[in-house]
Amino acid sequence: MEANNDNTQTHVVLSQGAMVQHYRIIKKIGAGGMGEVFLAEDTKLDRKVALKFLPSHIAQDADVRTRFTREAKAVAKLDHPNIVTIHEVGEFSGRPFFAMQYIKGKTLQHYCSEETVSVGKIVNLILQIAEGLTQAHAVGITHRDIKSANIIVDQEFRPKILDFGLATVQGGDALTKAGSTLGTVAYMSPEQARGSKVDHRSDLFSLGVVTYELLTGRTPFKRRNETGTMHAIINESPEPLERYKSDVPAELQRIVTKCLAKNANERYQSAADLAADLRVLERTATSGEHETSGQSAASQPSIAVLPFANMSADSENEYFADGLTEELLNVLAKNPELKVIGRTSCFAFKGKQEDLREIGKKLGVGTILEGSVRKAGNRVRITVQLVNTSDGFHLWSETYDKVIEDIFAVQDEIAGAVAKALDITLLGKSPEKQIKNPESYALLLQAQQAMLKWNKESALEAIDLFQKAIEIEPDSARAWAGIARVYMMQSSYGFEDTQSAYVKAKDAALKALALDDKLAEAYEVMGLIRWRLELHFDEADSAFRKAYELAPSNTRMVSSLSAFLGSMGKFEESLSMSKLAVELDPLNPETHVNHGKILLHKGQFAEARVEIQKALELSPEMTSLYGNLGWTYLLQGKFDEALSATEKEKAPGYRNCVLAKVYHAMGEKQKSDEALEHLLSMPDKISWAYQIALVYSYRNERDHAFKWLEIARTSQDAGIPLAKVSPFFKNLHDDPRWPVFLKKMGFPD
């Protein structure tokens, strides 16, 4: 007979051979604050099971027994490979029990403290647990006691969640206190620790604690006693994972941080969203392509150039400080040995007094270049320093007092010093010719800043500034490339007639290339022209690849090549590039949108939704993001969510395009017709030809779909090159007119 020395000793001794209905006890295999567990033989079905009995001090409460039975029956209906199956719910000698699947294996607690697991395997384990929680939460079941001891890993290394429903039984504060241990408290969410209302997001916090524990061997908030632990859970931030484990991907740090948000509204709002993020990470973590929270797995040198502070007496010289920052970014981005963070992510820290080590973690870089600029007339003083983000140590610093005409030489000297400090070969150089006229250079920088606003007025302002720069220096290749890009922007956003903008863009791009055949920006614009307007795909491919070759760490060059490859159906190469763009510019919503669209075209709709949502977190007001989000929900068959997201879309044309498809999917033909009619009644409906074709195709109205596809093709609609890979045209793929259309478009077989 086994002695029962724990505080949940039964009033009926269960020894080896004792019968509990048709179950024969083999041995006691566990005990804790919420019950005892016995290994038993099911004599009816000749199988081993685990019997769990509710503790005596709780079992005496009739209401608790009723709730336990009701909730255990609800959990028994769950059928998921990552949730332990409950076979039966019963009562023996006044104590409720349930018979559950017996798993041979070890709990996650073993892998936290005794056996090391690779990052890739940890990501896979947590992903499977999140998938199990997804099903449980979908039917209204919250675990409330997710911890490493409550998850067992079977012999196939598949995790299974134990004790579903038991923590729910605990309910109020008294039961929680009576049945808790320090180990359980260490996994509580802040709302649990405060005794506040708990929902499914509490499980996600606890799973974040488990993930942290698997990675580091310790829970993030555990202190000397329960009071200290609860205080830490409610008030303190966990230490960065890299303090305990050096090879943690930056994306995994972001995921864990989001799970551990104190405010439930700032966490993942569903286990499904968490699982989608982990699924994306798993592919990179297992292939070794991920970035750690500092340097990459291959220790690739990495740098972020923060916006230089404008120390000039004249605040109007802000453009000069920003422009110099961008110039350095462009020079450094030409080096394939160096990971250079993109402009948007770097400029997200403009004017913020944030610890450089924290910025380094957020951007996933080992070094940061920062400085200040003081401009007075034709003279400029530049102070710059290179900082190691792991310890805040200054690797190099210098001050330059120069005239404007020497600015390119200063940029090259700074880039050279960075290369030397990071032990890389400097390939990027500023243009060979020096500035002829400081006024032209100032106009160029101002035009580049105007372009960043991306609206009709700023586009016209940028063109005017570029043209003034060209009047002073007609052989300025960068000014011509800038003009070409602005005209392409005007064409894409409908700010100018497509054909007129196209002619002007091509003319300017050709002039830029004639003046400088090593200008990445000119090749990228030419790629856009060949791809979106001329449909010359081979030439577009060459242009985009040349731009990427010349500036391999320039986010725009990477993103453009990625988008083009995706439109050609080259998804693996495209996704590799779009992931790189996200790594290079993680705080840029456009990199996430591009990555999301490629995932969507590839058919990975849940992962696509996660990327669009990340973009929305970064830029809630970004045009068309809600429409894109509606797309992803629609393609997942989540029509209510699709409708809710799309109704927030601000662009009326885009909103009606998506609404027409959503209402069609919901079987509401009249509303779908109304949304389509809004599209067809727009004065510029020709510019929406591609979107109209999408709607007709989705509604399986093929004649109309092909009619509008032809209109889109002949009107050089910027969306038409995506037709081959869009999931909304699948209804046309078995139509004999489809291959004819693709041939007209010039798509390769």
Image (cartoon, rainbow, N blue to C red):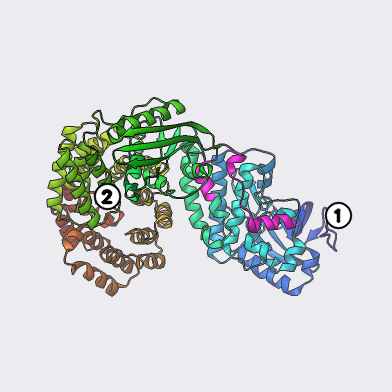
Residue 705 at what x, y percent from top left? 20, 60
Badge 2, how many Cα within 10 Å: few under 14, some, many 20+?
many
- State yes or no: residue 99 in magenta: no
What's under tag 2, amino acid-wise? Met
Q: Main secondary structure of the magenta part?
A: helix
Q: Looking at the image, how many numbered discs can be counted on the residues?
A: 2
Q: Residue placed at 17% from the left, 47% from the top?
A: 533
Please rate how many residues cluster around mark 1, counting C-alpha atoms within 10 Å: few if below 14, some from 14 to 19, many from 20: few
Instruction: List x then y, in percent, for residue 86.
Output: 65, 60
Drawn side of residue 32 relative to residue 428, left or right: right
Judge whether residue 234 is colored magenta.
yes
Of labels 2 and 1, the one closer to you: 2
- The answer to whether 269 is drawn above or below residue 603 in the figure is below
Residue at horizontal 17 percent and vertical 45 percent from the top: 468
Label 2's element?
helix
The foreground one among 353 and 390 is 353
SS at mark 1? Answer: loop
Query: Is residue 451 at least partly visible in the picture?
Result: yes
- Amino acid tagged 1: Asn
* Residue 317, numbered circle: none
Label whose residue precedes the other's in the sequence (2 or 1): 1
- Residue segment shown in magenta: 226-255
Position of 494 relative to 481 (above/below): below
- Residue position for label 1: 5
